[in-house]
Image (cartoon, grey):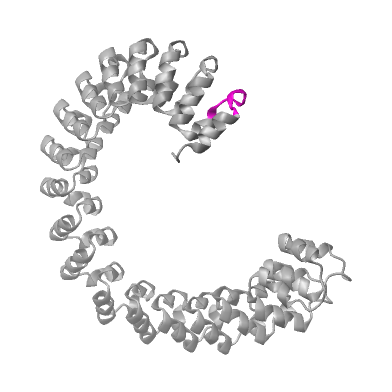
Amino acid sequence: MAANDYPSLLTNPVSAELINQVKQNPDSIANIPAVTATPELYMLAVSIKPELIGKLPTGILTESFCDKAMAKHPEVFPYLPETAKTPERCMVAVKHSADAMQFVPTIMMSEALFIAAVDRFPSALQYIPPTLMTGTVCTSAIKADGMNLRFVPRALKTPELCQMAVDHSAMALQFVPEELRTEVLCQSAFDQHPGALRFIPKQLMTEERILAAIEDDATILQFLPKKAITAKACQNAICQNPMTLAYVPEKMKTGRLCQLAVELNGLALQFVPKKMKNAICCLTAVLMASDAIGFVPEKQLSESLCRIAVRRKPALLEKIPPKKRTLELCRIAVQGDGLILHAVPDKLKTAKLCTLAVQQNGSALQYVPDELRTYDLCQMAVSANPVALEFVPDELRDAALCLEAVANNGMALQFVPELLVTPELCKTAVMKHKRAITLVPKSLRTPELNRLARSRKKD
């Protein structure tokens, strides 16, 4: 029941002030005089903060109060005094929450209680003391969810119970004792879910089963014993999912298998042994996935290979060792993404290269060396991206440049030097972008300008 609904049940007069006080801070019930507080007010506090029930005055925590609390708010059960946890209240609690079982006093535990709990919440089996579990209780839990076999004591794991668990959930095979994992049981699990192969005894892992499991999910390769993995299994796994090359035993990673993997997914190059990363393998990988350049050994990083990657994805310039970043490679990169100028070695940041970067993205100005930030370059940057005004040296931010920036993007007003912020410039900013009013100094924020901002359409 929601706390907001409770006041309607109050039978004794309680001020709205006290009700609101308890709603806002249920702990405050402890400071309310007993002559003022009512059972209903205590109930309100408990409904909001269940743990308070264990701190209530003895005179309030009556049998009647406990019964009502359990009926309306069974989540209070863990906080009841042990003497108040009667069989009836325990039953109400375990039917409300699986976790309640762990708070039931041992003396109150019975098979009837356990069955009621697992019938409603099968996972409650985990909270039943192993020494008190019975075959009937375990069977009830397994019928609902075979994975509950994990909580069944070894002594109660009979062949019949294990079969029942596997029939309901193939992956429950992992909780079956080794000596009970028979051919029949394993086949039953495998037929339901090939992934159960990982829990089948090694002697029963036939190539036929392995290949069938790989066809269902190639990543199962990672869970198989190395001795059970065959060349055919590896090839089938790679064809199904090239990235499973990561799970192929090193001694089985042949040049042919690695080439097959990168032909299907270039990123599989990361799992190719270094000695097998030859020029052809690396070229194939990069052609298939340009990001594979990050897994190419430095000795295989030819200029042409780097160009292929950077042309497709300029940001990959960062993946290339600095000494391999040539001027031509950097030119290709910044033409595709000006912001990658930050990855260009300082010695290669020429005026021409910086111009190319700024032409592509005005914000690239931030990565241009100070000595190369000329007025013309800054004007080019601001024309391409008005907020690039932020990266223009203070001495170059003149009225004309600031006006150009603000006229194209009112929010650029935030980067205009204080001395150049005029009423006219503020009006231009607000006309371009209504939110620019927030950037206008208070001394210039006139009623007329505020009205202008409000009249502008939503940006």
In the image, 236: left or right of 83? Answer: left
How many numbered circles does the render carry? 0
From the viewer's side, name the closer residue of 400 and 166.
400
- Quarter of the image holding residue 132? bottom right
From the viewer's side, name the closer residue of 137 and 154.
137
| Magenta stretch holds residue 408 | no
Q: Is residue 184 visible?
A: yes
Question: Residue drawn at (83%, 62%), measured in percent from left and top?
Answer: 31
Q: Is residue 80 visible?
A: no
Question: Residue drawn at (45%, 83%), measured in percent from left and top?
Answer: 156
| Magenta stretch holds residue 445 | yes
Residue 143 in the image: above or below residue 432: below
Residue 296, how many percent across, how many down? 21, 35
In the image, 116: left or right of 46? Answer: left
- Quarter of the image holding residue 17? bottom right
Residue 351, how many percent across, how many down? 29, 13
Residue 248 in the image: above or below residue 36: above
Question: Residue drawn at (57%, 78%), measured in percent from left and top?
Answer: 96
User: Which range is magenta?
Assistant: 439-446
Residue 183, how many percent across, how many down? 25, 79
Q: Quadrant of the N terminus?
A: bottom right
Residue 309 in the image: above or below residue 264: above
Question: Residue drawn at (22%, 19%), measured in percent from left and top?
Answer: 327
Residue 332 in the image: above or below residue 126: above
Q: Quadrant of the C terminus?
A: top left
From the viewer's side, name the closer residue of 17 and 246.
17
In the image, 319: left or right of 151? Answer: left
Residue 291, how many percent across, how many down? 24, 39
